[in-house]
Image: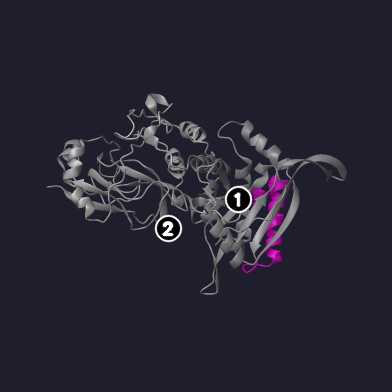
Amino acid sequence: MPKVLEFKLPDLGEGLTEAEIVRWLVAVGDVVAIDQPVVEVETAKAMVEVPCPYGGVVTARFGEEGTELPVGAPLLTVAVGAPEAAEAADAESSEYSGNVLVGYGTGEAVRRRRRVRPAPVGSVSGGAASVGAAPMGAEPSGTRVASSAPSNAQVAAVPVSPGDGPVPVISPLVRKLAREKGVDLRALTGSGPDGLILRCDVESALRAADQPVPTAAEAVPVAAGSAAGTRVPLRGIRGAVADKLTRSRSEIPDATCWVDADATELMAARAAMNAVGGPKISVLALLARICTAALDRYPELNSTVDTAAREIVRLPAVHLGFAAQTERGLVVPVVRDAQARSAASLSEEFARLTEAARAGTLTPGDLTGGTFTLNNYGVFGVDGSTPIINHPEAAMLGVGRIMAKPWVHQGELAVRQVVQLSLTFDHRVCDGGTAGGFLRYVADCVEQPAVLLRSL
């Protein structure tokens, strides 16, 4: 007799207490292998694929896509030792791996699944009922592909007749839109490959029923009698950003100072570096290298405040965060030990983390542990800003756009490449003299890159 094991939402680390189900990767009746990802969740830090430590047949799933679950809540149940699982296990010799996150522990995880006959699922349904929840509908999700395959590979869905079998839709946004608007997906004929139901199919059904089509899947209609407008839930990354910025402004007595700098020589130095071949050096990498040199001179700004002990903790390494805007919101990836990296190494790490941020594959570890943040808001075409400190750090350097402006150079008016630099700092860790000294040193290195050579 197979035994039914319950897999709960694991502790994803970094103090996270809940996660939102974004996409189920398996359905009831699927055979899963040990360490196979079974669900994609969004935490306040990142998107995470959660692998199941058991191998067997999925007998129940708990929570619909879009539902927030606390750590320790049931995710799914697996019948371990079922004939179908044994048939698919091949050379697997263990029923439990102990892993909770992709990339930890066993490196030979098998990413494959197959459908099984409904009858065996019924044979273990009693075990699923014992945990106090009924299995959800078995809509199929996209088949998982090997990591070397393109991430946007599409998997054909099998068309079905309304009211019978799985629904041919793989997008969680399409399912959520249909659920919120009361559209029966089983009654639709998909216009995608092999009958796949797309968002446009749901919108066509809404128009046919004279229902308004929402502009965003996350928009929540306002209840009757409340203030006019559309309410957007503050959750996931947007909610985490809101909480952190609110905490920063409520706890940190911040102050901001700024200066304009002539970046013409810095841009010329970058052009000369890139002219000799090899990996391209980004402006952000040069500014990061300048920041680490400045923090070596002014270590007060690479610190944090222990409010309970009433102590300032100066940190030995510079873990440099940088603001990155993505479709999912603002994130701050962290470059570890930035003070030990060259400009070329910093460029490569910035590029890697930026790509991961855009793809939504940053891990919680990539987004935590920063000690100082570099914010290049110049990419938005603005000159200046007053950054909010990334709690619990003590300072943030903001960089505006570099653009041609009239400037007095060597006693004469000339057109130069000018940038505005702003430093927001925690006034508890230092006074204006230290902050001004840091910012002036950064500006000097921007105007005369040779100044930086003294600290290399």
Residue 379 in percent (x, y) is at: 65, 42
- Local secondary structure at mark 2: loop
Q: Nearer the viewer, residue 370 or 274?
A: 370
The structure's colour scheme is one colour
Query: Quick check: 391 above or below 56?
Result: below
Instruction: Please count the marks in the image.
Output: 2
Give the CA separation, mark 2 to mark 1.
31 Å
- Residue drawn 39% across the image and 30% down it: 149
Tell me the residue that label 1 is attached to: 229
Residue type (three-letter) at the residue carrying disc 1: Gly
Give, as a single range, the part of the protein colored magenta: 427-456
- Local secondary structure at mark 1: loop
Q: Is residue 319 visible?
A: no
- Tell whether position 432 is magenta: yes
Q: Within 10 Å of the Cα at label 1, are there few (<14), some (14-19), or many (20+) other Cα atoms?
A: few
Identify the residue at the far top of this view. 194
Camera-side mark, 2 or 1: 1
- Tell whether position 144 is magenta: no
Residue 288 in percent (x, y) is at: 60, 48
Tell me the residue that label 2 is attached to: 16
Q: Nearer the viewer, residue 448 or 267?
A: 267
Identify the residue at the far right of this view. 412
Q: Nearer the viewer, residue 361 or 17?
A: 17
